[in-house]
Amino acid sequence: MDCLEGMKYIPDNSIDLLLTDPPYMISQENKRINRKNMDIKLDFGEWDHFKSEQEYEEFTKKWMALAYSKLKDGGWFMVFFDKNKICLLEKIAKELGITSKTIFVWAKTNPTPHFRRMNFISATEFIWMGTKGNMRMKNYQKQTEMYNYILYPNRSAYGETEHPTEKPVEVLKRIIKPVTIENDVVLDPFMGSGSTAVASIQLNRKFIGFEINREYYNMAVQRINIAMSQTKLLYGVIER
């Protein structure tokens, strides 16, 4: 269902981590690039279409405010976001009372080439991070595992689904682990193909996810079922 409706059913102050990849409003409707053996779609789907910047800002405020009310004090707020709109997210976060912590950088080791050679190659994605309050991390890792960047390939190397913006499970696990402990609850209002859910299952965290697109929902359910069966098998072996 629509997360703006679904999140109303979640008790306030009950979520340990909000981790999501919301619409960016960066799609170029019906546009794609064809170069050599590559076909790059620049229109991600209806879910990324908005009539105006104002409509997009109001939508972002609504889901962020609702998600914020569900977070526990000390809970973390992690959002993949367009580099050109980070200031908008910072502004809304400040209004809500979210404490800005850092911007985590995913540097892609195999980015899409820049065919026109008019700019630097876009090889990074950004995850804005903040907290409800200013609490310490629950599960701080070794110093070398706590840098605010990760080197990891793009979806051409790890992709499991046809979702155009599928995120890598390993990147999500890297940022989930330090701020949560086992059985904590992770919320993803824009679940897409279910990567946040899979990462949560593999780390033995609970999750709640919403997805309005039936096709993507079915992708997510399939991946979740596989992840849960694999996790049960793993724990069964450990118990023996």
Image (tube, rainbow, N blue to C red):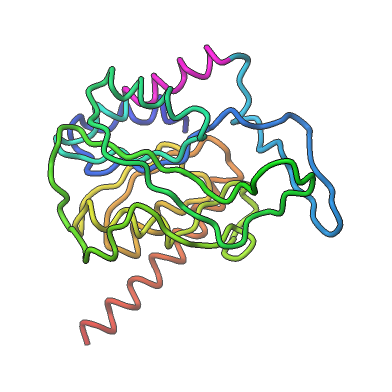
Q: Where is residue 212 shown, x and y percent of the image?
A: 52, 35
Q: Left or right: 34 with respect to 60?
A: right
Residue 110 lies, in percent from the top left, at 61, 61
Q: Residue at x 52, y 34 (%)?
A: 82
Figure quadrant of the C terminus: bottom left
Query: Which of these two is toward me, 86 or 205?
Result: 86
- Main SS, magenta region, reads helix
Is residue 61 located in the magenta-colored stretch of the structure? yes
**Image coords of residue 182 (percent x, y):** 20, 59
99 sits left or right of 89 in the view: left
Identify the residue at image location x=61%, y=47%: 122
Vertical relation: 97 (above or below) 195 = above
User: Going 56% across and 62% down the picture, which residue do you hit?
Assistant: 109
Query: In this view of the protein, which residue sits in the foreground, 52 or 122?
Result: 122
The outermost residue toward the bottom is 240
Rendered image quadrant of residue 213 = top right
In the picture shown, does residue 74 fall above or below 89?
Answer: below
In the displayed structure, would residue 199 be above or below residue 77? below
Residue 40: percent from the left, percent from the top?
75, 47
Q: Which residues are magenta?
A: 53-65
Q: Farthest right residue?
A: 36
* Relative horizontal placement of residue 203, taking residue 50 as reference (left or right): left
* Count of numbered circles in the view: 0
Q: Is residue 98 magenta?
A: no
Q: Is residue 44 left or right of residue 174?
A: right
